[in-house]
Amino acid sequence: MVSLASFQILEICKDAAGVAGNIFAFGLFVSPIPTFRRIIRNQTTEQFSGLPYIYALLNCLICAWYGSPLVSPDNLLVTTVNSIGAVFQMAYIILFLTHAEKEKKLKMLGLLLAVFSVFGLIVVGSLLIADFEFRHLAIGFLSCASLISMFASPLFVINLVIRTRSVEYMPFYLSLSTFLMSTSFCLYGIFSFDPFIYVPNGIGTFLGIIQLILFAYYKSASSEDSREPLLESYA
């Protein structure tokens, strides 16, 4: 049996890891700013895709819902970080829509409507589940799958870095923020004994380590004139 003192220490460690994760996540949320500065400057979205922002918004909404008291107990720090992330994604999507061509704009609006529709169905459907534990498990598996797929997206960048022997498309601070945020929430999940948090973030931590190792190995081979990244990956 866990003593009261041990429980209090775990709670302190959990809260500290959660707060750190919220802070480190800010690095991820602001990472697309160079891309949007370019879009605003050129008044066009060029060849940039809005799909990653749409997917990131859905991921943030699902994970924010998982952290809410209606789904899981004492996980508000998960809700705060993903709620802030959702606000950032909405801001990026609005900027993208403002500068996109008509065809892209209509496609993005359709996808945005689909995101809110899917999220609405998830919320309503989960609230119809009277058993709190089953509701927690259902949304937990959904959020875990969403996070794993989000963390898997850097695999394409990792493959590109290895093929080109250049880290031009893998910004260091983005990789570092991913590693720090994933590690923080992995510890948060461990301290709260929540596999739906520590499993996907453990995968994110592992991929973050790989990115940092590749960056250190291929940095000397990278071009001095780096381009803005098309997009990041989230929590």
Image (tube, rainbow, N blue to C red):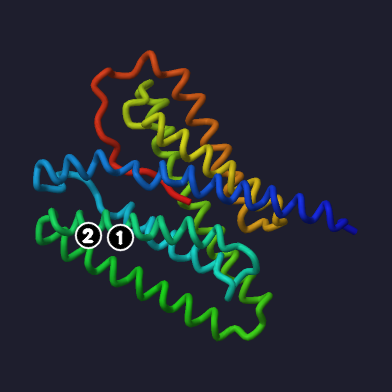
Q: What is the crowding at mark 2: few (fewer than 14 residues within 10 Å), some, or many (at least 20)?
A: some
Q: 24 or 213: which is nearer to us?
A: 24
Q: Is residue 157 above or below residue 234?
A: above
Q: How many numbered discs?
A: 2
**Three-letter residue code for mark 1:** Met
Secondary structure of the residue carrying tag 1 is helix
**Three-letter residue code for mark 2:** Ile
Q: What is the crowding at mark 1: few (fewer than 14 residues within 10 Å), some, or many (at least 20)?
A: some
CA separation, marks 2 and 1?
A: 6 Å
Q: Name the residue under label 2.
A: 94
Q: In which quarter of the image is the N terminus?
A: bottom right
* Residue 20, quarter of the rendered image: top right
* Residue 162, quarter of the rendered image: top left
* Residue 106, quarter of the rendered image: bottom left
Residue 140 point in image, percent of width and height: 59, 65
The numbered dot on residue 90 is: 1
Secondary structure of the residue carrying tag 2 is helix
Residue 137 point in image, percent of width and height: 64, 69
Q: In this view, does 130 lie above or below 56?
A: below
Q: In this view, does 159 lie above or below 95?
A: above
Residue at image coords 27%, 18%:
224
Residue at image coords 67%, 82%:
131
Residue at image coords 72%, 56%:
193
Disc 2, disc 1: CB below 8 Å?
A: yes
Apparent side of residue 90 relative to residue 194 in the rendered image (left or right): left
